[in-house]
Image: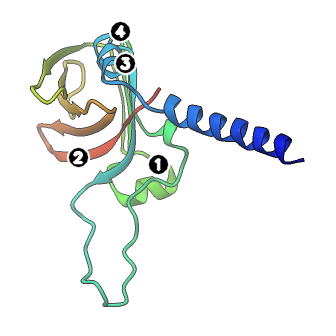
Amino acid sequence: MKNPLNLLNAILIAIMMTSCVSSNVSPEQVKAKIYSNNFSFVANEFDNNITYSAPVGTGRIASTNIPQVPDEQIGIQVTHDKLVLNLPANDNGSKTNNYAVNKISQDFTVVRKDLDNDNILVNFFLNDTKDINLIKMEIEKDGKINCSVEGPNLKPLLYSGYLKK
């Protein structure tokens, strides 16, 4: 009776360990995806400088700025010939699914730079939109991304998220 249970436990542990290992993205996979110019940035946090921080112990519960919809709908999709932005610009946009930054650019220039710490800097210069002209991304070797969206009449919107597999 113990033998089948031990075997079952061993199989279960092996499955759990392989599923954990397979969820990691290697630095080589991240670099290949970024340089292929075919990837998606999923934004799961943003800082628009209108949130407040309350001192600990004041009894206030700060509202979250994490969007309330599935992650895959919020972010930036990059393909060889198109850049699609679907991002909130404030807390209200993330709660109502009404995103202020909805753009599709088909005329853009990409500049990439490898850093000493294996991170990659990527700048997208948008030539066909007037209100947004620059998207900056720093992609870490584990797939985490910090991003800013900038324009001539737009204060920088800061996002963080991850590289979609």
Q: Nearer the viewer, residue 153 or 144?
A: 144
Tell me the number on the disc at residue 98.
1
Mark 2: amino acid: Leu
Q: Earlier in the sequence, mark 2 or mark 4?
A: 4
Instruction: Write down the residue under mark 2.
Output: 157
Q: Nearer the viewer, mark 4 or mark 1?
A: 4
Q: Position of residue 66 (x, y in %)?
A: 42, 56
Mark 3: amino acid: Gln
Q: Nearer the viewer, mark 2 or mark 1?
A: 2
Gap between marks 3 and 1 measured at Cα: 33 Å
Residue density around tag 2, few if under 14, some if 14–19, many if 20 or more, within 10 Å: many
Q: Is residue 27 left or right of residue 63?
A: left
Q: Nearer the viewer, mark 3 or mark 2?
A: 3
Q: Are marks 2 and 1 in contact (CB under 8 Å)?
A: no
Q: Earlier in the sequence, mark 3 or mark 2?
A: 3
Q: Nearer the viewer, residue 22 or 52?
A: 22
Instruction: Write down the residue under mark 3.
Output: 29
